[in-house]
Amino acid sequence: MKDYTTEQLRNIALVAHGGAGKTMLAEAFLHVTGATTRLGKVEEGTTVSDYDEEEQRRKISLYSSVIPIEHHDHKINVIDAPGYTDFVGEAISALSVADGAVILVDAVAGIEVGTELAWRYADQFKLPRFFVINKMDRENANFEKAYEAIEEFVRMHGKRALKVQLPIGEKHAFKGVVDIIGMKSYLGDGKSTGEIPAEMKEATEKAHFVLVEAAAEGEDELMEKYLEKGSLSDEEMVRGLKDVVHAADFIPVFCAAGAHEIGILALLNDIVDLMPSPLNGPKRVAQGRTGEEELKALDSEPLAAYVWKTTADPFVGKMTYFRILSGSIQADAHAWNQNKGVDERMAGLHFQRGKEPIPAKVAHAGDIVSVSKLNVTATGDTLCDKGHPLTVKPPVFPAALYRVAITPKTQADAAKITPTLTRLCEEDMTLTWQNDAVTRETVLQGMGDQHIDVALRRAQTKFQVGLGMHEPKIPYREGITRKASAQYRHKKQTGGAGQFGEVHLRIEPYPDGDFDFVDELVGMNLSRSYLPPIEKSIRATMERGAFAGYPMNNVRVIVYDGKEHEVDSKPVAFEIAGREAFKLAVQEAGPVLFEPIMNVRVTVPDSNMGDVMSDLNTRRGRVQGTEAERGSTTVIAHVPMAEMTRYTTQIRSITGGRGYFTMELDHYEIVPNHIAGAIIEAHKKELEAKKDE
């Protein structure tokens, strides 16, 4: 691959609803520009983009892959991002390092949930964007209908759609596109050009007139010329359109059939002409020594390279993908990882094309590069010059709310569970894990069931660690509601020295803290030296739970009397007596279970609000209020955590994938009796089963 300077680069994220044809469009780009000799197919697992065995097994994209395309002396780094909601983290990462977005729309399905998501994130990164009506060769494909849906959608977001291409035929008769800027037709993939078909002349001229007007809005000088002459040259049109497209005020709309390679070169031409190079892309900033610094995509600037993706491969080792936001990097050079405070050597510098590494000697400002075998660098880190430290802030990812408890399949897997989960979460910013102190479970959180399933398969295939999963326990807490007292005598005689200890104690609610142990001993019945073992055993019982197997807190224990034996009394006897006296007192103290109540914010289209409200009611939710925003409503409610375990799947099903939610712990409340009874019963059965073992 030849050396491309910053001006010759285009970084484009290919985003859409799952199944709109992104991977096949990238495949067509490669084939038409001569980078591959045959067109791969998703069904056969032969595409450059979907090279992971799990992608080939499922026949969908799970990870973003970089596909550099060489066209007209430019390099277009196309990042093919997954379209399924569970893998939205990959799409966000791709958009965060792109300078423009190409949003695909299926010519039959039109605007779908994934289209809206792709738009929302492209908006977040302030990216110029194209719409491509793809799969124009499908039965029932309808360009005008799809275009009207796009036009309406774009207008709703305060922007304007522009036809820059018209299809020549559609469905099985789709054979090319008319380029409205150059007023010529491209047949097939676009290598042969021709006259505009006579029946399309009128529609083309009408669209050309709209384009010229839009281009004239780009610059005052062009507007004057347009008003004076009534037209603009092709070069002037491109210049004016560049301005309005870069500002994301106007959204050009194209048409193509990726799988049949129709309309491909015409689309690549306009990516080169209308999408910004890194020099004119969205503004990027980094945190420097003295505050925020604006980054300029120039080789002469200090180095700032943002790591947006890392992958682990048992054969290749660790691959780190980064975008150079400013400065340049030579192969074998050293770079400073500002997040980790470590020097890293760029030993294997490559331009990655799917899984094929193309060796690179130098990477210029704005380019997307990969390097193998870095020691500590992870996704979200910044590489820079040690003398000029810079940190680029990672994008905000949606919170992972689908929880599963993870268990190792074998003893050998148990030893590797922590490093494996840490590696998985380093690679994927939408995965998190922690050891739950209350339930003593290892909990993995992701975007949905498919996301978790892929992560566990990855643990198996890439790290050879077998992991199982089940629904996680809810971190309930035990508590008491009134004062009570109890006493217990532990007496054991087994020939020789026996065990003896007797403890009298009171307990009461202690709302101001977790635990308070009070000595109210009077007289000589019980020596104070036995108080520490009594306290130790009560603390241990509170940690494990006194009646349902969950930690207890907010309790004050007062030891006021007891008995000891001058020969048989030992610390262990008082540990047992203290524990049993405490358990007896708890039974009389109005024991209750407390459950975590979450503050939930559910954002849904207005039309689904009634269904969501009634569903929350069935989950024991209490609606606290609503907030309205253009076309959607956010419902704020307090809902028990136990009722939210699979809500990710439920909200997608109620809203056709358009709803999403966030939740965080708000407070604890007493579990209703009928539910608490079942939890306590289950705990008793568990204890009995352990005894039988």
Image: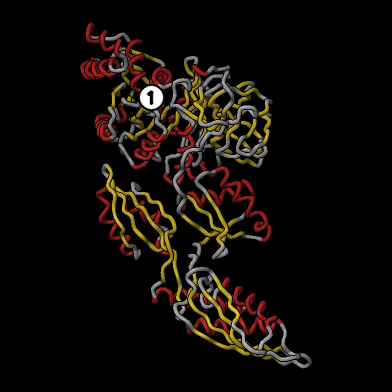
Please state the horizontal and vertical placement of residue 517, each as a whole percent of the image.
58, 75
Q: Residue at x 61, y 82 (%)?
A: 578
Q: Residue at x 39, y 57 (%)?
A: 599
Nearer to the camera, 317 or 482: 482
Q: Residue at x 48, y 74 (%)?
A: 479
Its colouring scheme is secondary structure
Amino acid marked by disc 1: Ile
Q: Farthest front residue?
A: 523
Q: In the displayed structure, would residue 145 be above or below residue 271?
A: below
Does 165 sit left or right of 68 as displayed? left
Q: In the displayed structure, would residue 56 be above or below residue 229?
A: below
Quarter of the figure with residue 315: top right
Dot 1 crowding, Cα within 10 Å, few <14, some 14–19, many 20+: many
Does 107 sit left or right of 324 as displayed? left
Please state the horizontal and vertical placement of residue 163, each as a whole percent of the image.
29, 23
Is residue 405 among the parts visible in the rendering? yes
Quadrant occupied by the N terminus: top right
Please state the horizontal and vertical placement of residue 234, each as a whole percent of the image.
33, 10
Does 41 sit left or right of 159 as displayed? right
Does 504 sit left or right of 512 as displayed? right
Please state the horizontal and vertical placement of residue 218, each as a whole percent of the image.
31, 17
Quadrant occupied by the C terminus: bottom right
- Give the labeled residue for mark 1: 262
Quarter of the figure with residue 138: top left
- As helix, strand or loop, the secondary structure at mark 1 comes to loop
